[in-house]
Structures are given as structure tokens and as C-alpha cells.
């Protein structure tokens, strides 16, 4: 079970590496404006957020996270089969929206399954299983960058959507082979999930994480565009992303020791402060070594941040509501955070005709969750 989950993370985040790194440049190659790129990705996130909540609630209610995961990946694959042939904003938007009916639930279902599975095996941990996803991200972020450069940096190169589709197809097949996890006897009712929204500790975590993720939107959507606007090769995009994820892997490996030495609140603060610095410096970077080297701060932006987020959710959310809690996190942080950030990033790119200023604004936004951690309530809540 653990070995299959590792490969699932590897393949899933290999797909994320393909999509996050090269989808926006691919759309630019098709002639999309920044606003159109922002809108099609906004549509995807708006659909993904409620869909994740529904799938998470169903999985908890029926005690069937693995079966729900298999259904979601199959639906996602079916919808994305049209991506290589979608050439207009309307066509791309429809494909992404249809896939989002299923894709938004994949990570929360996978995470909830993994958290339960590692508890049954001595010596295993979520962080060490999840880091295989980081390895998959590195492989495709670097590998596809080299492939696109080798093919001559073609505008709208279909190697991008086909590579993404291959990753989705591979982990869809693996999802069908995962053994079912024993269902819990204390299955929650729908109204039990509503109690989560009354938990002040959980609401604080969701708020600071959503703002952080919104501030990361220019990087997730426009990093490849920034590299091209600077006149640099796709190899720089791949190298920067790969270096960032290597730093992320080391952060995840070190996180259990960091958690023993520092409070959760202090680690959250370090993640937010380091990310603000990263965006401020990246907005001014011009040369390839600067652009690539700054991605080492991804250790804080995602590695430490994600370790804190998972730890906080495990402390706050009851086990029987784990899939629902993860789905709520995914909907509000990845869904709402990405949706707002993507829409603003796309519109901002058209206004400034450059991705650089977007990172300056992102650095300012990143200070908000840092300020929230200084409030008296946050001191009390996040120390738990």
C-alpha cells in the first residue's frame, strides 16, 4: 500500500510539474492574453472548490476514500482527453472546468488515505511518503523543459498537454489498483462536518494558508512566462523549479526535527517571511543564476509551509472527518486562493505587460498572514 501511494504521489506531482511549469507559456504560445490565461484557470478553481468538498464529504460518509479517489482520477482523465485539441479560451476553459469536477478532490482524498495508511506501518510518515511527489515534480519540470528547448521552443507545443495527459493516465491506472482501506465504524453525518466551520483554530489556519497561497499565484501561473519575458530558455524554468523542489524535499525531511525544536506558529512565520523575501527579490532578478538560485527559498514557501499545514490539520480535525477537513482545506486554500490569485495575476500581466511587478505585489500580500500570526488570538490558537 505505501509503495503504491509513493508512486501515486510521484505521478500526480509529475503532472503538477508539467502543468504548473509550462501551461501558461503554452497558452501564451496559442495567443492567449494574460487575462484569458487567468480566466480559464480561475474557472477551473471555482469549480474545483465545491467539488472537493462534495467528494470529501461523500468519502467520509461512506468510509470509502480509496474508491472515491479511483472515481475522481477516472473522471479527470476522461475530461482532460480534450486538452491537446482545445485551441481557444472557451474550449480550454470548458476542458479545465469539466476536469475540475474531479481533480479538486484528488489531493485531499490522497492525503487522507495516506495519513491513515502510514499509521498502520511502523517507521512510516506522511512527510516521507509525500516527498515522492516532490521527486516527480523535479523530473518533469526539468525533463519537459529540456524537451521543449530541444524541440525549438515552439509556440503552443502540444508536447506539453500530451505530457500532462500521460501523467494523469498513469496515476489514474494506479488509483484503480489501490487496496481499499478498512472503513471506520464511526462514520460522520453531514451535519457533523458543519461543526468544522465553527472551530476558530481551523478558521485561522485556513485564512493564513489561503492568503499565502493566493500570494504564490504569480509563481504558480506566471513563472514560466517571467522566464520567457526575460529572454531566457525553458531550461531555466525547469532548472529553477527543479532546484526549488529539491529544497522542498530537504525541508520536508527536516520538518519532524524542526517541529520538535520550534513551535508551529514560529515555523509558519518563517515560511511566510521567507516567501515575502523570495517574491521581492524575484521581482528584481534579471539573470538566469539569480532566477534559479532564488528558488531555494521554496524550502520555506512550500516545504515548511506544507509541513505546518498538514500538522495543524491533524491536530485540529477529528480522524473521522479527515477527508472532509482536507477537502475543506483544498477548497478554501487551493481553490479560493488560487482562483483569486490567478484572476488577479492574469489581469495584472496585461496591465503591466510583465510578470515582474506581480511578484512585488505578491511580496506585500505575503506580509498579511505574518501580521495575523502576531495577533493575540493567533498566538493562542496556533500554539496548540
Image (cartoon, grey):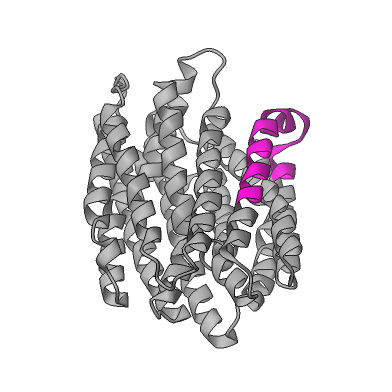
Side of 56 relative to 329 (left or right)? left
Q: Position of residue 24 (x, y in %)?
A: 46, 68
Side of 305 relative to 285 (left or right)? left
Q: Quadrant of the N terminus?
A: top left
What residue lies at 68% left-to-right and 38% top-to-bottom? 251
Whether residue 261 is in magenta: the answer is yes
Stretch of the chain drawn in magenta: 242-267
- Name the one closer to the observer, 273 or 369: 273
Q: Residue furthest top?
A: 122
Side of 220 relative to 360 (left or right)? left
Q: Quadrant of the C terminus?
A: top right
What residue lies at 34% left-to-right and 47% top-to-bottom? 166
User: Measured along the vertical axis of the image, is residue 358 above or below residue 74?
Assistant: below
Q: Position of residue 103 (x, y in %)?
A: 33, 50
Q: Position of residue 356 (x, y in %)?
A: 65, 75
Residue 265 in sight from this viewpoint? yes
Splitting the image into 4 quarters, where does residue 186 fall?
top left
Splitting the image into 4 quarters, where does residue 208 fall?
bottom right
What residue lies at 29% left-to-right and 22% top-to-bottom? 179
Whether residue 207 is in magenta: the answer is no
Amino acid at each position: 500500500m505505501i509503495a503504491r501511494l509513493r508512486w501515486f504521489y510521484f505521478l500526480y506531482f509529475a503532472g503538477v510539474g508539467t502543468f504548473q511549469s509550462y501551461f501558461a507559456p503554452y497558452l501564451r504560445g496559442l495567443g492567449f492574453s494574460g487575462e484569458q490565461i487567468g480566466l480559464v484557470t480561475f474557472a477551473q478553481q471555482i469549480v474545483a472548490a465545491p467539488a472537493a468538498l462534495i467528494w470529501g464529504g461523500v468519502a467520509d460518509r461512506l468510509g470509502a476514500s480509496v474508491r472515491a479517489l479511483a472515481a475522481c482520477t477516472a473522471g479527470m482523465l476522461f475530461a482532460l482527453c480534450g486538452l491537446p485539441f482545445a485551441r481557444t479560451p472557451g474550449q480550454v476553459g470548458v476542458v479545465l472546468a469539466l476536469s475540475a469536477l474531479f481533480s479538486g478532490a484528488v489531493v485531499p482524498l490522497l492525503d487522507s488515505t495516506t495519513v491513515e495508511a502510514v499509521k498502520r506501518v511502523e517507521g512510516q510518515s506522511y512527510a516521507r511518503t509525500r516527498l515522492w511527489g516532490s521527486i516527480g515534480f523535479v523530473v518533469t519540470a526539468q525533463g519537459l523543459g529540456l524537451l521543449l528547448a530541444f524541440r525549438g521552443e515552439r509556440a503552443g507545443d502540444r508536447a506539453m498537454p500530451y505530457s500532462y495527459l500521460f501523467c494523469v493516465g498513469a496515476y489514474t491506472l494506479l488509483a484503480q489498483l489501490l487496496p481499499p482501506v478498512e472503513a471506520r465504524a464511526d462514520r460522520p453525518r453531514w451535519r457533523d462536518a458543519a461543526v468544522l466551520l465553527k472551530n476558530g483554530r481551523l478558521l485561522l489556519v485556513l485564512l493564513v494558508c489561503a492568503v499565502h497561497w493566493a500570494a504564490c499565484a504569480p509563481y504558480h501561473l506566471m513563472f514560466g512566462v517571467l522566464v520567457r519575458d526575460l529572454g531566457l530558455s525553458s531550461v531555466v524554468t525547469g532548472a529553477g523549479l527543479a532546484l526549488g523542489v529539491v529544497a522542498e524535499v530537504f525541508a520536508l525531511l527536516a520538518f519532524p526535527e524542526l517541529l520538535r525544536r520550534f513551535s508551529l506558529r514560529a515555523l509558519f512565520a518563517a515560511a511566510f517571511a521567507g516567501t515575502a523575501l523570495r517574491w521581492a527579490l524575484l521581482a528584481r532578478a534579471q539573470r538566469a543564476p539569480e532566477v534559479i538560485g532564488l528558488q531555494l527559498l521554496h524550502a520555506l514557501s512550500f516545504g515548511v509551509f506544507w509541513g505546518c499545514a498538514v500538522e495543524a490539520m491533524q491536530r485540529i480535525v477529528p480522524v473521522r472527518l479527515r477527508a472532509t477537513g482536507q477537502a475543506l482545506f483544498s477548497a478554501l486554500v487551493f481553490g479560493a486562493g488560487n482562483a483569486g490569485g490567478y484572476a488577479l495575476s492574469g489581469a495584472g500581466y496585461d496591465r503591466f505587460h510583465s510578470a515582474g511587478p506581480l511578484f512585488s505585489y505578491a511580496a506585500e500580500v505575503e506580509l498579511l498572514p505574518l501580521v495575523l500570526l502576531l495577533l493575540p488570538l493567533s498566538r493562542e490558537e496556533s500554539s496548540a
